[in-house]
Amino acid sequence: MRFENDQQRRAFGRAAVIGIEFAAAVVACLLGGYWLDQRYNTEPGFTIAGLLLGSLVGFRLLWKLAKASEQDMKG
């Protein structure tokens, strides 16, 4: 992949980081919920809760990165 300038390279890097952080948050919380379900025999309660928590954490990360990008573009 060729980038025309450093700004495009940075934008691509930010997008990659956003995707990786979002996926990591969802997967970590989902696996934690699954582990709790297996430990306490409560399927699928903790797994669903983990998925929801991971999604919320992921969207919070997206929000913070979007705000930081907005500030970078302004100043």
Image: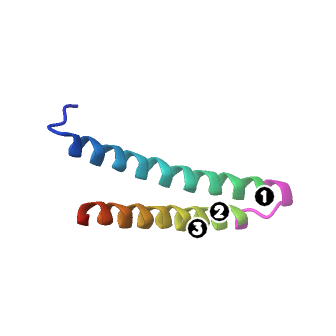
Measure how far apart labels 3 and 1 are at the Cα level: 15 Å
Camera-nearest residue between 37 and 22: 22
Q: How is the structure coloured here?
A: rainbow
What element does badge 3 sit on? helix
Which residue: 64% across, 65% down? 48
Work out which residue is located at the far left of the displayed protein and give it. 4
Q: Is residue 52 above or below residue 20?
A: below
Q: In this view, does 32 lie above or below 46?
A: above
Image spot of residue 31 (x, y percent): 67, 51
Disc 3 crowd rating (10 Å Cα; few below 14, some 14-19, many 20+) is some
Q: Which amino acid does label 3 sit on?
A: Leu
The boundaries of the magenta stretch are: 37-45
Sequence order check, earlier mark of 1 and 2: 1
Which mark, by number, is residue 19?
Answer: none
What element does badge 1 sit on? helix
Per the image, is 14 magenta? no
Image spot of residue 11 (x, y percent): 28, 48
Measure how far apart labels 3 and 2 are at the Cα level: 5 Å
Work out which residue is located at the far top of the displayed protein and give it. 1
Which mark, by number, is residue 50?
Answer: 2
Disc 2 crowd rating (10 Å Cα; few below 14, some 14-19, many 20+) is many
Sequence order check, earlier mark of 3 and 1: 1
Query: Residue beneath label 3, please?
Result: 52
Query: Residue beneath label 1, please?
Result: 36
Q: Is residue 57 left or right of residue 10?
A: right
